[in-house]
Image: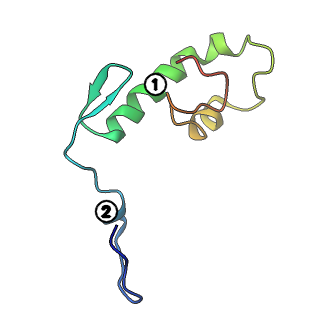
């Protein structure tokens, strides 16, 4: 990992730059981490109504739960994956 010089500025684009390598997650291949995250976030969004029936489901809006999650690795509710 390269060290940043004291006065060197890094742009947001450089920090979030996606690699051209495909991402494989749970047997599915995605072009990028962003695509993987979008796919599994929508899958989690679709499953939230049934997950809300589980005892101990957190109190919060769907958007809050989705914002705190990185599905399928981590979800701020019972993990359906």
- Asked if disc 2 and disc 1 are in contact, CB closer than 8 Å, the reply is no
Circle 1 SS class: helix
Measuring from the top left, give residue 71's x and y in whole percent: 50, 30
Measuring from the top left, give residue 58's x and y in whole percent: 76, 28
* Chain-order first, disc 2 or disc 1: 2
Residue 65 lies, with reference to residue 51, above or below; the image says: below
Closer to us: 25 or 59: 25
Q: Residue at x 32, y 72 (%)?
A: 2
Q: Which residue is mark 2?
A: 13
Side of 10 relative to 54 (left or right): left
Q: Residue at x 33, y 19 (%)?
A: 27
Residue 42: mark in rendering: 1
Side of 35 relative to 55 (left or right): left
Residue 36 lies, with reference to residue 27, above or below; the image says: below
Measuring from the top left, give residue 78's x and y in whole percent: 66, 21
Closer to us: 56 or 59: 56
Res 33 → quadrant: top left
Res 49 → quadrant: top right
């Amino acid at each position: 990992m390269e060290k940043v010089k004291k006065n060197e500025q890094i742009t947001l684009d450089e920090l979030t730059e996606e690699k051209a390598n495909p991402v494989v997650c749970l047997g599915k291949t995605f072009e990028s981490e962003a695509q993987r995250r979008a796919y599994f976030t929508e899958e989690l969004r679709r499953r939230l109504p049934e997950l809300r029936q589980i005892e101990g489901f957190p109190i919060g809006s769907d958007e809050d739960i989705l914002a705190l999650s990185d599905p399928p690795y981590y979800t701020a509710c019972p993990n359906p994956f």
